[in-house]
Image (cartoon, rainbow, N blue to C red):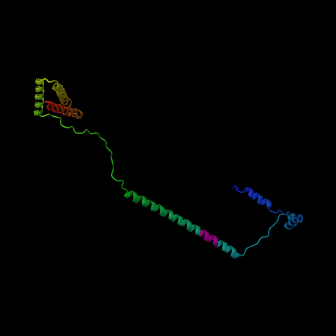
Amino acid sequence: MKEFNRERLRAALDRLPTYQPPTEAWSAIQSGMHVSDGPVELPEYSPPSHVWNTINQKLDQTKSRQTNVRQMRQWLGRAAAVLLLFTVGYWSANYDAGPAVAVQESVEQAPIRPAFTALSEDEKSFEEMLRELEERNEPTLNQLRYELEELTFAKRDVEAMLVSYGQDAMVINKLADIERERSAVYRQIIAVR
């Protein structure tokens, strides 16, 4: 054990008075012990019988208490084990993990809109407009006519791509953009005329 106040303890011990016994005290002790006659024999005493009886009774009581405590611990251990097994069994029988969840991932393409088909009357009106602009041959209208012709050729090319390669969403969106631009140019021509 470590002493924390070592200096204080040393100072207190140094302050204690010291005594030297007289030399004749040691000779009196030796003569009382009969050291010169051989080994010292201490006197033996027999205790009364009721002392031994009391000691035996207390030992028996302690032994029975220890036995009772041991038996109690064994029973408590067994009861705890049974309770634990019952609890685990009950819990496992009534455990519900919930619905099984499976994650499935797939990529689907948005449904393709049907191909944009212009009405025949609308196409006829675009062609009539182009013929009329060719006959008029005015510089401001010629620029709009070239734009309309260019957009018409682009529309035919995109429609041919749709027939050749199938219904692709990007191509259909491009066709819709071309149709919007054609309609805008058509409206400009009508406004200038």
| Among the 4 quarters of the image, the one containing residue 95 | bottom left
- Residue 160 in the image: state x and y as whole percent: 18, 28
Please tell me whether the stretch drawn in magenta is mainly helix, strand or loop.
Answer: helix
Tell me the magenta residue range.
57-64
> Residue lying furthest right in this view?
24
What number of labels is visible?
Answer: 0
- Residue 172 in the image: state x and y as whole percent: 21, 34
Which of the pair 74/10 is nearer the observer? 10
Give above or below for 66 relative to 106.
below
Q: Which residue is found at the position 69% from the left and 73% from the top?
A: 52
| Among the 4 quarters of the image, the one containing residue 151 | top left
Which of the pair 31/25 is nearer the observer? 25
Give above or below for 74 relative to 193.
below
Give above or below for 24 relative to 143.
below
| Among the 4 quarters of the image, the one containing residue 143 | top left
**Does the stretch in magenta take in 43?**
no
Screen quadrant of the C terminus: top left
- Residue 136 in the image: state x and y as whole percent: 11, 24
Residue 173 falls left or right of residue 56: left
Screen quadrant of the N terminus: bottom right
- Residue 98 in the image: state x and y as whole percent: 34, 53
Which of the pair 177/186 is nearer the observer? 186
**Does the stretch in magenta take in 59?**
yes
Q: Which residue is found at the position 66% from the left and 74% from the top?
A: 54
Q: Which residue is found at the position 56% from the left and 65% from the top?
A: 70
